[in-house]
Amino acid sequence: MERKAPSLAECVQAYLDSRPSLTGGLEWLRGRRYRLAALAGRTPVAVIAHSWRDERAARQVALALEQEWTRVPESCRSAYTEILLLAPQLIVVQVRRNNVCGCLAHRHVLVTEKPFADPHEAFGGAPVGEMDIAVKRVEAWQALPLTDTAFDASFLEGSRLEEFRERQFRLKLLSILLHETNHLVFPHEPESSVRERSLTFYRVALAAYVAYTIQTLSLTIDRSFSRFG
Ligand SMILES: [Zn+2]
Ligand SMILES: [Zn+2]
């Protein structure tokens, strides 16, 4: 039987592992870590470059790409079909805490992350792009001030609120990653239209999540009442 060709993510991981141990060791000592995440298990593949201190944020970025993307309504995904088709297959995402300029994220004109700066055989000719994302800024960012607060109120109880905050954070991360990918693919598209697309993505995805959760909440309540019926 023919063996399945390794995925791009597997090739990149093999490349990282195959580098001389001195290079990898020095990187490790500097605290640099890489985590791979493929959008819904396919492409683009994100190389989440982060410090060992930002392990948690890097995990949220990975979950946003691997899980959140598959949970959002189809209309959210289809708004990005063309962009993702034209996007670099490999995207380095530099996780930062804050940006001095105050931006949530930037696309980079050149790839600066060392192991990915030069074209490499291991990537099978896949084009590489790069962006950064400031996770503390994203966490504090009020994307839709009024709606966000209204939603918050319906989840004010304990673990539900925690879960809500986490899913909201991931949806914000995802919408920003898509926003910057949009810039990478169409550098001349005006900011207003790029922004409109990513905000719509966030608004519709968050509303769908909230609607679903409220529905399941009331189902649980109904069931517990029926025990006394
Ligand atoms: Zn900036
Ligand atoms: Zn922008």
Image (spheres, rainbow, N blue to C red):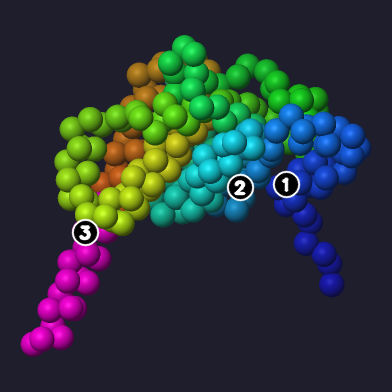
Are circles 1 and 2 on residues that touch, CB within 8 Å?
yes
Give the mark nearest the N terminus, 3 or 2: 2
Left or right of 96 in this view: 201:
left
Q: Position of residue 172 (x, y in %)?
A: 39, 37
Residue at 71%, 47% in the rendered image: 9
User: Which amino acid type is marked by label 2?
Assistant: Ala
Query: Magenta segment, which residues?
Result: 210-229
Note whether 101 is above or below 17 in the view shown.
above
Q: Nearer the viewer, residue 158 or 160?
A: 158
Note whether 162 is above or below 193 in the view shown.
below
Secondary structure beneath disc 3? Answer: helix
Placement of the C terminus among the 4 image quadrants: bottom left
Are circles 3 and 1 on residues that touch, CB within 8 Å?
no
Give the mark nearest the N terminus, 3 or 1: 1
Q: CA distance from mark 3 to mark 2?
A: 30 Å
User: Which amino acid type is marked by label 1?
Assistant: Leu
For residue 10, say whether it is visible.
Answer: yes
Q: Which mark is residue 8?
A: 1
Q: CA distance from mark 1 to mark 2?
A: 9 Å
Q: Position of residue 207 (x, y in %)?
A: 26, 47
Kindly identify which residue carries mark 3: 214
Kindly identify which residue carries mark 2: 38
